Image: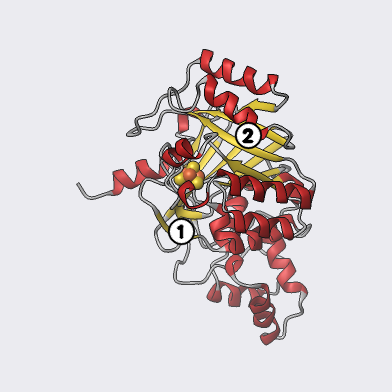
Amino acid sequence: MDLLSPPVARILPAFLDQPADALRTWFADRGQPAMRLKQVRRWLLDGRAESFEGMSDLPKDLRAELIGSFAPLGTRIDRHLQASDDTHKLLVRLADGKSVECVLIQEPPRRTACISTQVGCGMGCVFCASGLNGVVRNLTAGEILEQLVRLRNLTPPDGRLSHVVVMGMGEPLANLDSLLEALEVAGHKDGLGIGARHITISTVGLPVKIRRLADLGKQYHLAVSLHAPNDLLRTRIVPTNDKTGINEILAAADYFHEKTGRQVTYEYVLLGGLNDSPREARELATLLRGRKAHVNLIPFNDVEGLPYARPTVEAQTAFIDTLRRAGLSVKVRKRKGSEIDAACGQLRRKVEQELAPA
Ligand code: SF4
């Protein structure tokens, strides 16, 4: 499936990207009551409107002013792929021509949006297509929010997003201000109504930002992408590890748990022959023993151009058994949408390659 959404007037600023104060002033300058802002937001966030024309409870002249001043949404859908398990992947084109991916995973009543926070990624994890060309820029709060809106608009008319995982392109904590701004609207009852407890923020481990997140007193769930149980191996897989080291990251994650009471998830991509041996399983068990931790194992999905392999079933089973015997809670992530390049960054890479001059 390949649907193109209507083009947007790119020269106009996106309504959802404007700070609330600026919008309040904009309405007040036109003699409009404060509730107008709420009405427009409700249309865009709850009413699935993608234009101002149809906002029937707004005065006609105000609709005309809005049309002349803003684009309701600043992004457009460049590619839309749907897998047989009803996983959807969108390549979202931003106003400056850059693109990011986002994914809707549907297991009703659970509907999970996986969103991006940066164009590209500067963390350079060796198994990841998103980081292959480094980071281009941070997304704005509106661009993050619009991914949620566009994914929610794919759900049935009475459907809503129940969960958000911030695990798409980019390091979320490297763009924390914009992310928090977007999640604030997403969590609001007049926004998308997704409670903080249903939102998971993933990070390769930026200790200062993890502590800042902990101090907010919000109930977001934290997922730390560990991928190796010692610094030598982790720095090979996640190069930015050489600046921090595992101990500092775990200390920050412990602090997050103390402050929020929430269990931390440790993500571990199993790369065949690299970090999936019984020795690494034992080391990981020792590292996490005594912590209120959950381990999410992710068997690597092949990515064209990357020299890593999926772990064997035997290696996966042995790894899980070792962790469980050590008393850790462990899950293996199910593979969703495999036929639509659902691994992070693959679709964007493919489209950019198609568009590149020969
Ligand atoms: S796995 Fe995440 S943090 Fe690592 S390069 Fe990819 S997008 Fe960045």
Left or right side of 139 for 329: right
Q: Pick whichever, 248 or 72, lies toward us.
A: 248
User: Residue visible at 44% across and 38% down?
Assistant: 237
Rate crowding at label 2 as few (under 14), some (14 to 19) or many (20 or more) other CA atoms within 10 Å: some
Left or right side of 356 for 217: right
User: Can you tell which quarter of the image residue 38 is in?
Assistant: bottom right
Q: Measured from the top left, where is residue 349 in percent x and y? A: 37, 43
State the residue position of label 2. Answer: 287
User: Can you tell which quarter of the image residue 285 is in?
Assistant: top right
Question: Can residue 191 be seen at all in this image of the molecule?
Answer: no
Is the C-beta separation of discs 1 and 2 under 8 Å? no
Question: Upstream in the sequence, badge 1 or badge 2?
Answer: 1
Element assignment for label 2: helix
State the residue position of label 1. Answer: 94
Q: Pick whichever, 204 or 67, lies toward us.
A: 204
Q: Amino acid at mark 2?
A: Leu
Q: Amino acid at mark 1?
A: Leu
Q: Measured from the top left, where is residue 273 in percent x and y? A: 43, 22
Q: CA distance from mark 1 to mark 2?
A: 41 Å
